[in-house]
């Protein structure tokens, strides 16, 4: 039996790409032929995937398994719908279009098309969300609940452990200032403007020796609005947008920041929360989408964006070593639930549903 996976793109560092690679590595270890196909890819992707137009030669193989990763509208959904393989859909969620309307209408159109298409993807033998939040969206879209489940993200948390930090950049972060960090695409649903507002309250009212570091690819129109906001607030020189950065710089950010803050209002999973856990960085996150599920009771979850109160909470955590240690301990414990062994066991359950006669290879 072959295991095929189709993704919209295969790019280095991308969460969907990492999930596909984790599945690929495991099913290969279990003795199955495994292939990944993508509509687009960067140089890294070209080393590990094929273009999706090469998949149809296998589409009539009824004993093969096709895993389709859905995270944005992409024309390769037709390969999935028309395939005769047994089918598993993995839904990574699609941002609601209204977040993009003001800043990027073309992206809003893609999001709208992607969400409108979801009911047509219910031809799956099994549909999985990488969070229960995502699974419930599938059920709401008409998928039979009994044919849905959850396969959590398998974040490559040890990837940065083997990377040398950017020493020069690290020295700049270790100048005595308190660093607040956000990692992720700088796009409207992440509500980075609300992080800027929190930082303003913290910087002006609590700790003038502080900076905000934002690491992630930039959407120009939204980025311009954020720059304008920071300047109007008089903190433009303390808010640093790094854009997409190397793993070396990302490691420096995690190692030499003091708090991780998320104000996102739509998340299907949110891997950076777990990365921050991994580096013992206390996390404060707004309870939206799958964020409460991902955090699992660890970190600091808040339900109201009271910037002044949150700034005071940061100050308390700075002064209260016991509170900080309890927060970090809970985050470490939560990470244990996202181990490689746990992911392998859950994936094996999925594979056994389609090849019970070969289940011995997964034992």
Image (spheres, grey):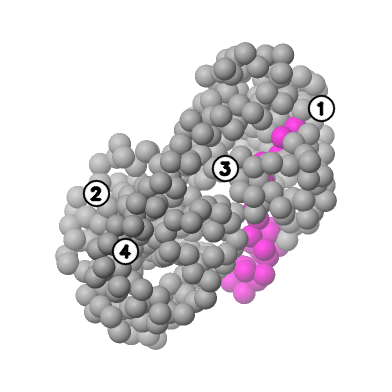
Q: Would residue 187 be seen by someone viewing this image from the given angle?
A: yes
When the figure is inspected, residue 221 is found, relative to residue 167, above or below; the finding is: below
Sooner in the amino-acid sequence: mark 4 or mark 3: 3
Reply yes or no: does residue 95 show up in magenta.
yes
Looking at the image, which residue is at 72% across and 14% down? 357
For label 2, the SS is loop
- Point out the frontmost of discs 4 and 3: 4
Please give left or right for residue 118 compared with residue 182 in the image: right
- Residue picked out by circle 2: 166
Looking at the image, which residue is at 60% across and 14% down? 361
Q: Nearer the viewer, residue 325 or 248?
A: 325
Q: Nearer the viewer, residue 349 or 188?
A: 349
Q: CB of mark 2 within 8 Å of CB of mark 4?
A: no
**Badge number at residue 264:** none
For label 4, the SS is helix
- Residue picked out by circle 1: 84
Query: Which residues, given as a range, are shown in magenta?
Result: 87-111
Distance (Cα) linking label 1 and label 4: 55 Å
When the figure is inspected, residue 145 is found, relative to residue 363, above or below; the finding is: below
Q: Quadrant of residue 164?
A: top left
Please give left or right for residue 244 compared with residue 29 in the image: left
Crowding around mark 3 (Cα neighbors within 10 Å: few <14, some 14 to 19, many 20+) is many
Looking at the image, which residue is at 61% across and 40% down? 151
Sooner in the amino-acid sequence: mark 1 or mark 4: 1
Distance (Cα) linking label 2 and label 1: 49 Å
Q: Position of residue 134 (x, y in %)?
A: 66, 51
Q: How many marks?
A: 4
Crowding around mark 4 (Cα neighbors within 10 Å: few <14, some 14 to 19, many 20+) is few
- Residue picked out by circle 3: 152
- Point out the frontmost of discs 2 and 3: 3
- Residue picked out by circle 4: 323
Sooner in the amino-acid sequence: mark 3 or mark 1: 1
């Amino acid at each position: 039996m072959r295991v095929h996976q189709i993704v919209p793109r295969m790019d280095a560092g991308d969460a969907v790409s990492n999930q596909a690679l984790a599945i690929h590595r495991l099913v290969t270890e279990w003795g199955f032929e495994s292939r990944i196909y993508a509509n687009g890819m960067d140089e890294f992707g070209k080393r590990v995937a094929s273009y999706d137009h090469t998949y149809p030669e296998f589409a009539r193989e009824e004993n093969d398994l096709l895993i389709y990763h859905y995270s944005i509208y992409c024309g390769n959904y037709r390969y999935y719908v028309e395939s005769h393989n047994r089918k598993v859909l993995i839904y990574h969620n699609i941002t609601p279009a209204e977040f993009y309307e003001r800043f990027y209408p073309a992206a809003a159109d893609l999001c709208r098309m992607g969400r409108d298409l979801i009911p047509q993807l219910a031809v799956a033998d099994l549909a999985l969300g990488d969070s229960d939040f995502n699974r419930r969206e599938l059920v709401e879209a008409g998928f039979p609940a009994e044919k849905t489940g959850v396969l959590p993200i398998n974040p490559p948390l040890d990837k940065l452990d083997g990377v040398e930090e950017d020493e020069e950049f690290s020295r700049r972060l270790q100048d005595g200032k308190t660093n607040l960090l956000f990692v992720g695409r700088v796009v409207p649903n992440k509500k980075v403007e609300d992080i800027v507002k929190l930082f303003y309250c913290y910087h002006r009212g609590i700790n003038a020796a502080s900076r905000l570091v934002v690491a992630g690819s930039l959407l120009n129109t939204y980025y311009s609005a954020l720059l304008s906001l920071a300047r109007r607030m008089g903190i433009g020189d303390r808010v640093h947008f790094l854009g997409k950065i190397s793993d070396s710089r990302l490691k420096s950010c995690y190692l030499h920041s003091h708090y991780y803050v998320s104000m996102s209002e739509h998340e299907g999973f949110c891997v950076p929360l777990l990365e921050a856990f991994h580096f013992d960085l206390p996390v404060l996150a707004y309870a939206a989408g799958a964020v409460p599920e991902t955090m699992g009771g660890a970190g600091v979850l808040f339900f109201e964006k009271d910037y002044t109160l949150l700034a005071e909470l940061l100050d308390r955590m700075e002064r209260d070593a016991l509170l900080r240690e309890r927060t970090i301990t809970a985050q470490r414990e939560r990470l244990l639930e996202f181990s490689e062994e746990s992911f392998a066991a859950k994936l094996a359950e999925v594979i056994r549903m389609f090849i019970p006669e070969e289940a011995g290879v997964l034992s």
